[in-house]
Image (tube, rainbow, N blue to C red):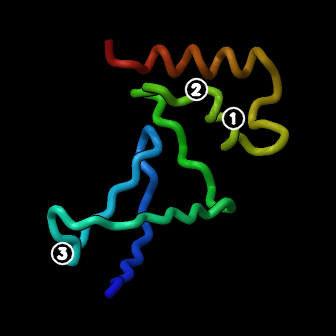
């Protein structure tokens, strides 16, 4: 007899998927099929621990047309963020 388990999970860094169920017995074999929602919004990047993440992924979350009016405005924002860091 085949038992089907269905859970919605979040893909972890490195493409890892974790499924936990009391119905899964140690040593049992299972066939896994992963269906990915292609319309799901990409996960916001973790800028403090980039790891293997592409740092340009943050651009996916920038509104069309951007949110700064000039390069000088961007530079000022970045400078103020750096000044706020605890070193």
Residue 10 image position (x, y, % from top left): 44, 57
Residue 55 image position (x, y, % from top left): 58, 26
Identified at 54% across, 48% down, the residue is 43
The answer to whether 28 is drawn above or below residue 57 in the figure is below
Q: As drawn, is 4 to the left or to the right of 28?
A: right
Q: As drawn, is 9 to the left or to the right of 62?
A: left
Q: Residue furthest left?
A: 26
Circle 3 — which element? loop
Residue closer to the observer: 69 or 21: 21
Residue closer to the observer: 39 or 7: 7
Query: Which residue was labeled with disc 2?
Result: 55
Query: Which residue was labeled with disc 1?
Result: 59
All told, the count of numbered labels is: 3
Of the 4 image quadrants, the one containing the N terminus is bottom left
Of the 4 image quadrants, the one containing the C terminus is top left
Q: As drawn, is 84 to the left or to the right of 56?
A: left
């Amino acid at each position: 007899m085949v038992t089907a388990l269905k859970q919605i999970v979040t893909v972890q860094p490195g493409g890892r998927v974790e499924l936990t169920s009391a119905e899964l017995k140690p040593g049992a074999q299972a066939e896994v099929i992963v269906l990915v929602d292609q319309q799901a919004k990409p996960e916001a990047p973790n800028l403090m621990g980039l790891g293997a993440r592409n740092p340009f992924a943050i651009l996916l979350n920038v509104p069309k047309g951007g949110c700064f009016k000039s390069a000088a405005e961007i530079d000022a924002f970045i400078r103020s963020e750096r000044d706020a860091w605890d070193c």
